[in-house]
Amino acid sequence: MTETHSGCCSGNNELLLARIKQIASQYKGKPGNLIQVLHMVQGVYGYLPVEVQRIVSTELEIPLSIVSGVVSFYSFFATEPRGKHTIRVCLGTACYVRGGVSLVDALTKKLGVEVGHTTADGVFTFEVARCIGACGLAPAIQIDTTVYPYVKPDGLDEILEPWYHDEGETEGVQ
Amino acid sequence: MAYQTLTINKFQDLEEVKAKVQAEVADYRHTIYVCGGAGCVSSHCTEVVQALKKAIALRGLSTEVRVVVTGCVGLCAYGPCMIVEPDGVFYGNLTPDKVKVIIDRHLIGERVVEEYCYFDEDRQAYVPYTKDIPFFNDQVKIALRNCGRVDFTSIEDYIAHDGYFALAKVMNEMGREKTVEELIASGLRGRGGAGFPLGVKWQSGMKAEGDQKYIICNADEGDPGAFMDRSILEGDPHSVIEALIIGGYTIGANNGYVYVRAEYPLAVERLSDAIKEAHGAGLLGKNILGSGFDFDLEIRIGAGAFVCGEETALINSIQGLRGEPRQKPPFPFQQGLWDKPTIINNVETLANVPAIILKGAEWFASYGVGKSKGTKVFALAGDIKNSGIIEIPMGMPLRNVIFNMGGGMKDGKAFKAVQSGGPSGGCLTADHLDVSVDYESLSAMGAIMGSGGLIAMDENTCLVDTARYFMEFVQDESCGHCVPCRIGTKRMLEILQRITSGNGKLEDIDMLETLANTVGETAMCGLGQTAPNPVLTTLRYFKDEYIAHVVDKKCPAHVCTALNTYSIDPDKCRGCTLCARNCPASAITGEKGQPHTIDTSKCVKCGNCITKCNFGAIELK
């Protein structure tokens, strides 16, 4: 998790696209790496718009239709710009029975966006997770890779606050 | 990576490392095992470890007291937690301040700090020793043998706990045929859900013809409520690596993959560090232990698709494709990854292998009942007091798991149901508490052992809503490849949504049952075939709740808000106006000092009034 993305809005689009091309080209002729490459590319660019998918397609010599099919199949891949951080409210069974839905409701109000969307200030993308495996700590939420245990709706402000100033870790695997 | 210079070329090297590590630790008076499982990490155990090490150094105890950060100790409800050995004292809910007190009073003063220990609510007493706490003392740890005991960052510590000795035994003494025979004799069955005998699977892999074969570890633990595999990968990654090398050697595969879900970044990190360590030591790569056998292991990270836990979908995902399942036959052992013979095993299943090789099939089979041999790891979660990870011999009554080890329900609530096996499993009731926990007994009840998630639910749970929850999950995760799963689960979900919103009819229940049976019989892969189970078991054991929803238009647990009716008891209402001021729909009216009333036609059933009222005057029916 060494890469940090600055998204499409940094003004360095050319540089980012070049970096993506470089990443993808390392895997030319290595079948089966498409998903891993997409993870890395999303880590750099923040999301996977068609122009980015096209670069991956060209470099890996895989038809764009296949690349696009994979991107749309997996929930970790996004085709819309994402916030600086990703909040996932876990709605696994344990979190569901321990009140995960009340956290979704509270965050919807606090962030001012529905699940699946990014806040107007671009700080958070708000999602629900199927299960983050923190069932012993239910209800839990995850911001990027940090897990918060036993979350209550009135404790959310305290959790969110530091992330508004955090420039470090971002979403993405590897 | 403290031991990059380590080289293991032969059996004697393992023995030397083991002896060296054991000699190093023999001088310590105490060892403190601090849980570094993902649960405790999110409860800030790193700060506890820092405070612990600092306190030990300040008091000049560094040569007497050893701190080991280990994998999951199990009792997540008490995190951050630690065990002080050789005393066997468990401390939970730790903070940096508490550990300083423990150092002074326990490690210097030799007096247990009882008030930081496990609290038994039934006995209203602190229980310091793990040997007296049912959560610990009813466990038999085989797959989890090293979790909570071994420093997961150190291959040397793993070797000191007989790590890689099973691999040496297989390569030097047993050979392929004997290994397979031993595993078949042990009765070890797949722990990921289907329960297929591992030895038989490996035998098919060994006999399969092909210039290239593969072995895959399925670590795509997607069932909500399950976190066993995560604990093993994070707490004892080398046991999985060792088992995969043994598997590769046995079936004749030189390449292995571990497919880990993207939701588990810590597991990915620790496993990839362990793979690098094993590579550095020569236990992965060329000519392992001088046997002439080469084996390489790679991690593949999923991208958030539940269906990829299905083995053929997983294979497609490793190939970089959409994770859609393939039609079987051909089975993966015939045509799997890149159409080559492929064996796929789950994390927990593999973690059992080195222990069986070292201690023998007979020892392993001495645990368990009938066709369910050995132990099973369960994740206890939901409305249960002692949430966490346990490993029990199969055949233990469910009651013991929930009430004795799990400590019963939280907040003094009554037990209502336990959900076993995630979206493929079923809900069991209080009537089933004496059922034995094994593959056959659970299947007979309509539930399944599944991967091992046990979610306990208290009296405030609506089982119709739970069935709707699982159907929503499955519907969302259905890959869309086959019609019964794609469309059948959608129609089932719509029926359940009608019922929980108060628009259900009696005939909906029959239709739901018919659809459930049809989807189960006709779907293409395991996901669709088992998807109706939560609906079928709740229909079987909680039909009265379905009827209450459709006939009486009531949700007995008051979970389905559309069916709730709020009213104000005029005898209890003081007319303080608090409820009226907090009602978002302005549905509450009344003069100050006079009993208020709720206009049910305006009420949006948010429940604000009930939480605001200080006099318990709001009634929910």
Image: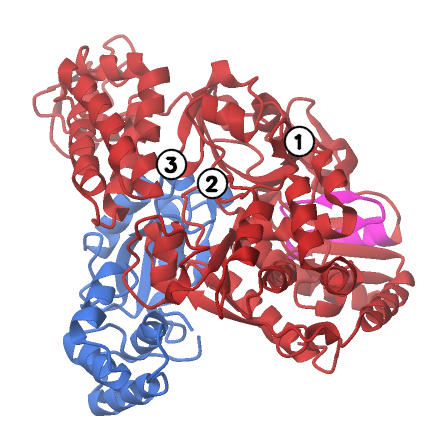
Chain colours: A blue, B red
Residue B596 in the image: state x and y as whole percent: 18, 17
Residue B103 colored magenta?
yes
Between residue B159 and residue B482, name the one nearer to us: B482
Residue B453 in the image: state x and y as whole percent: 48, 38
Q: Earlier in the sequence, mark 3 or mark 1?
A: 1
Amino acid tagged 3: Ser
Contact between marks 3 and 2 (CB within 8 A): the answer is yes
Label placed on residue B334: none
Q: Earlier in the sequence, mark 2 or mark 1?
A: 2
Residue under label 1, please give it: B368
Between residue B112 and residue B191, name the one nearer to us: B191
Residue B402 seen from this side: yes
Q: Earlier in the sequence, mark 3 or mark 2?
A: 2
Residue under label 3, please give it: B424
Does A3 sit above or below residue B114? below
Q: Magenta span covers which residues?
A: B84-107
Q: Mark 3 belongs to which subunit? A: B
The quadrant where residue B115 appears: top right
Q: Residue at x 40, y 63 (%)?
A: B337
B355 sits left or right of B284 in the view: right
Amino acid tagged 2: Gly
Contact between marks 3 and 1 (CB within 8 A): the answer is no
Between residue B103 and residue B39, name the one nearer to us: B39
| Element on which disc 1 rests | strand
Q: Residue at x 22, y 71 (%)?
A: A67
Q: Mark 1 belongs to which subunit? A: B
Using the numbered discs, state the Cα–Cα distance from disc 2 to disc 1 in whole angstroms. 17 Å
Does B309 sit above or below residue B386? below
Badge 3: residue crowd in 10 Å (few <14, some 14–19, many ≥20): many
